[in-house]
Amino acid sequence: MTSSHSTVFVIDDDEMVRDSLKALLESRSFNVVDFESAKQFLNNHGDDADNSCLLLDVHMSEMTGLELLRLLRSRGDAIPTILITGRTDPGVQAQAKELGVVALLDKPVAHPALFAAIREALAARP
């Protein structure tokens, strides 16, 4: 698994989820940069990580994960994205597919599925 030079941007408004994902990914030697909101990510994320992917919560206040992803795509940013959600519905699944999401995972996220999705996302990076 590519990890030591790979960055995973974790965006989730639940601090416990964010902290546990960060600790898990860092234990596998990923560089992790976490954000508590989509707006914080937009304000602080540069175009500095070629070997990166997003691990993005669907349901957040202010701006949802899908809204952030739509905005990034409209700007031409094709960063590979894994969505996580506590409640999946067919509308979210359809939008995720339309936006080219690598995977849509249910919380709590199963570690094998998460690492497989991250491998796929990083392999998809040009």
Image (cartoon, rainbow, N blue to C red):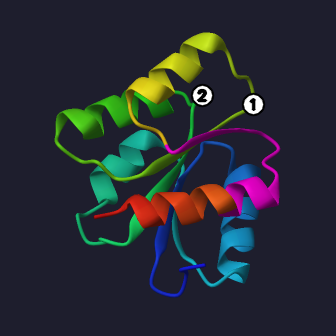
Residue 41 at what x, y percent from top left? 38, 51
Say if 71 sits above or below 44 in the image. above
| Residue 44 horizontal side relative to residue 55, left or right | left
Q: Nearer the viewer, residue 80 or 11?
A: 80
**Residue 62 seen anywhere in this rendered image of the structure:** no
Q: Quadrant of residue 18?
A: bottom right
Q: Magenta includes 4?
A: no
Residue indicated by mark 1 = 86
Residue 113: x and y in percent read 74, 53
Q: Residue at the location (28% across, 48% down)?
A: 78
**Dots 2, 1 in contact, CB < 8 A:** yes
Q: Considering only order in the chain, which callout, 1 or 2, is on the residue closer to the N terminus?
A: 2
- The amino acid beneath tag 1 is Gly
The C terminus: image quadrant: bottom left
| Residue 59 percent coordinates (x, y) | 60, 28
Q: Is residue 120 above or below residue 12?
A: below
In the rendered structure, find residue 13 and report the number of the disc placed on it: none
Examine the rendered structure and indicate whether residue 28 appears above or below residue 21: below
Give the residue drawn at x 46%, y 65%. 122
